[in-house]
Image (cartoon, helix red, strand yellow):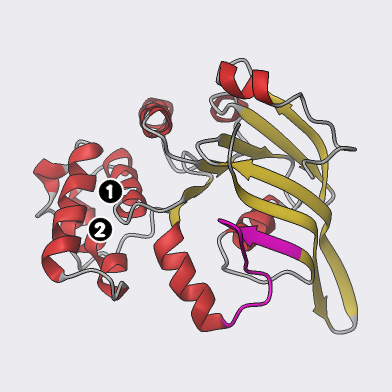
Amino acid sequence: MTEALIKLDKICKVFRTDEVETHALSDITLTIDKGEYLSISGPSGCGKSTLLSLLGLLDTTSNGEYSLASHKVSNISKGERARIRNKEIGFIFQSFNLISDLSVEENVELPLTYRTDLSKSQYRQMAKEALEKVNMGHRAKHFPSQLSGGQQQRVAVARAIAGNPSILLADEPTGNLDSKNADAVMELFDKLHAEGATICMVTHDPRSASKAGRIVELLDGKIVSDKLTATSKPARMESQPKQTPESAMA
């Protein structure tokens, strides 16, 4: 049996400005299992990035329940969200978000420096191991401006995985890369997933989406499709039937 890592139950997100309400997400019910590789797809403005922000505890829900590793996180304090986010969630962004005046190793170490459960020697070793895992250990002393786009994204992946998070959240991770570097990053994701990483990726690229074992499609803030792909692990296909929008991963 697979273990549920994330559970969303009838999640809604409403943005209010000048008495105008925008319903970005409506009644999202979704489960992400530990070790799963999930892609969220859909047209611009459908709610993909909003959903990823909620999953990453960067924003709060308007209604509904969100559970991460069996802990309800919908209504926790801002400080507690930050603590859980830093320990449990690894982020990978389209624009890399590396700090230009920090070296590669310092960029990877930075989120770990806020972890009170880690000593300096521990987080330095963790950063070193993460860089080796993405084949960027030889560039540890370089700065982002000295790297190609593909190399910068590899460093961003190292930063995301260094703290051994429960889940990796990737927002258009190949959006700023050419096809060769995009393929290299997706191969890296395949490797991380094979090693047990749980990955949730937002992408508008069908080629990237097809790499995932499961594709959830959004339209107008609602799930309209939730299906396994040909790359899905046989164990999951045997243990869990194909989902429909109606069953919505309760």
Q: Residue at x 48, y 74 (%)?
A: 82
Q: Quadrant of the N terminus?
A: top right
Q: CA distance from mark 2 to mark 1?
A: 7 Å
Image side of residue 152 versus residue 215, left or right = left
Could you tell me if residue 93 is visible in this image?
A: no
Q: Secondary structure at mark 2?
A: helix
Q: Are marks 2 and 1 in contact (CB under 8 Å)?
A: yes
Read off the residue under disc 1: 155
- Based on the displayed image, in which of its 4 quarters is residue 55 positioned? bottom right
Could you tell me if residue 115 is visible in this image?
A: yes
- Based on the displayed image, in which of its 4 quarters is residue 216 positioned? top right
Image side of residue 159 versus residue 182, left or right = left
Foreground residue, 30 or 177? 30
Q: Residue at x 69, y 45 (%)?
A: 31
Q: Residue at x 13, y 43 (%)?
A: 137
Q: Residues within 10 Å of mark 1 (few under 14, many from 20)?
A: many
Image location of residue 93, percent across then percent down: 46, 52
Q: Residue at x 15, y 60 (%)?
A: 124
Q: Secondary structure at mark 1?
A: helix
Read off the residue under disc 2: 108
Q: Which amino acid type is shown beneath numbered disc 1?
A: Val
Residues in magenta, as a range: 65-77
Image side of residue 114 versus residue 219, left or right = left
In magenta segment, residue 21: no
